[in-house]
Image (cartoon, grey):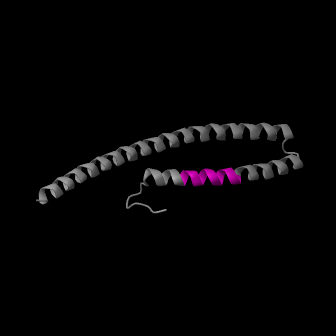
Amino acid sequence: MKKNSGSKLPQDEKIELQVEKWDAFARITPTVFLIISIILISTGYISFDTAFYLGLGLFAVTAVTWWFWTIYTIRHLIRTLNRASRSLGEVRDEFKDVKLKVEAFHNEQQP
């Protein structure tokens, strides 16, 4: 990913970076949790119930955090698409104006 001259990334690049982090989190965290839980349960440091409820709590926190991040990202996407749509509408209107001017110029040039 390219960075701007400043330390701030454009919003789109920030979201891409966040998606990459969520992807890594989703791949690594469950595996690490299971390995640590198996070790702790088999050595007797914690019971299965403790590991289960700890996993349930971590899952709930992750789900809620991910939900709010998803809503934020969708809101950004909608704003971006609306801006793009307005800009394309303006460009279309400008092309219509140019077309009319070219046709008028062409009509003036004909005898």
- Residue at 42% x, 54% y: name it: 8
Q: Is residue 64 visible?
A: yes
Q: Position of residue 41 (x, y in %)?
A: 86, 46
Q: Is residue 67 above or below residue 39?
A: above
- Residue at 51%, 43% (x, y): give it: 73
- Provide the residue span drawn in magenta: 17-28
84 left or right of 27?
left
Residue ID at (44%, 50%) = 11
Considering depth in this image, is 26 or 39 the residue closer to the camera? 26
Residue 47 is at least partly visible in this image:
no
Which of the 4 image quadrants contains residue 50? top right
Q: Is residue 23 left or right of residue 100?
A: right
What secondary structure predominates along the stretch shown in magenta?
helix
Comparing 41 with 87, the one in front is: 87
Residue 39, given in percent of the width and then of the height, sits at 84, 51
**Left or right of 106 in this view: 82:** right
Q: Quadrant of the C terminus?
A: bottom left
Q: Is residue 23 magenta?
A: yes
Q: Quadrant of residue 68?
A: top right
| x and y, in percent, of residue 48 in the image | 86, 40
